[in-house]
Image (spheres, rainbow, N blue to C red):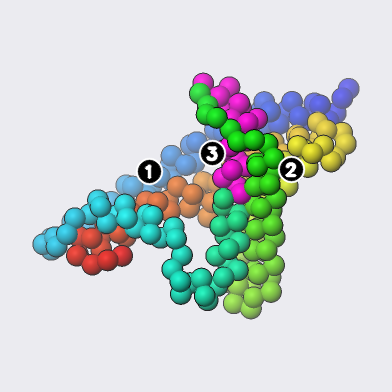
Amino acid sequence: MNEPMDFLIWTRSTAFDVAVTIFVIGVILRLFEIISLGRKQNLAEAKGTEFGPGMRTIFSRSVPDLGTFRRQPLTVVTGYMFHIGLFISLIMFVPHIELFRATFGFGWPGLPTPIVDAAAVLALIGLLAGLWHRIMNPVMQKITTFEDWLVWTLTFLPILTGYLAYHRMVDPYPLILGLHVLSVEALMIAFPFTKLMHTFTVFLSRWYNGAMNGRRGVES
């Protein structure tokens, strides 16, 4: 009986099906919850449009203002390192694309493996630097909750195990690959119920803030 291989098969079958089901249902329910809240009817006369300012805010809030960068350069730099590195590692890695193609029937071109490899290292450094800042900064210590530690761990482990698996740094290989898949599934299960959900809601909230300011005729 090959236990590491059995473990890998389980993570890619039963555990994967459970994780995907919880992820999809959870995200749909959370989005429904947010959208169903609606908004009160605004009886004031509109002084501007909503759609254009809302779209501009989505992009403008993605670029830090100079004041924020001067106050918290480490937070800004490590944040971009992590998000860019994670995006490339997750979306542009050919094996990930092939998994998506096998599951949903379509895919897209990937990037060369050395670029994705470097992006994974970038993401890991960004996460570790962010962790160091959270531990050493007195203000961050006071506002950090258990959920913050949980989300950091759930985000860090898939990248770390994926890097170890790709470079075959753990023997037996099926074990580390299975741990990588399992860590991703843990992330998927927690996703709808933690701050990770901001991946979807951040754009909704930015558009809404910009749209409301646009209606009032002010810049967001």
Seen at 65% across and 47% down, the residue is 119
Seen at 64% across and 75% down, the residue is 137
Task: Please tell me which residue lies in front, 158 or 29.
Answer: 158
First of labels 3, 1 by sequence position = 3
SS at circle 1: helix
- Furthest toward the bottom, the residue is 138
Q: Within the image, what quadrant is residue 128 found in?
A: bottom right
Q: Within the image, what quadrant is residue 49 found in?
A: bottom left
Indicate the position of residue 15 as horizontal and vertical percent values: 66, 32
CA separation in Å, label 3 and label 1: 14 Å
- Where's the N terminus, which quadrant? top right
First of labels 3, 2 by sequence position = 3
Q: Which residue is mark 1?
A: 32
Q: Are marks 3 and 2 in contact (CB under 8 Å)?
A: no
SS at circle 3: helix
Q: Which residue is mark 2?
A: 163
- Where's the C terminus, which quadrant? bottom left
Going by the numbered disc 2, the residue's amino acid type is: Tyr
Going by the numbered disc 1, the residue's amino acid type is: Phe
Q: Give the class, few, some or many, for how many residues have Cα within 10 Å of label 2's Cα (few <14, many ≥20).
A: many
Q: Give the class, few, some or many, for how many residues have Cα within 10 Å of label 1's Cα (few <14, many ≥20).
A: few
Task: Please tell me which residue lies in front, 97 or 1.
Answer: 97
Seen at 52% across and 29% down, the residue is 108
Q: Which residue is mark 3?
A: 23
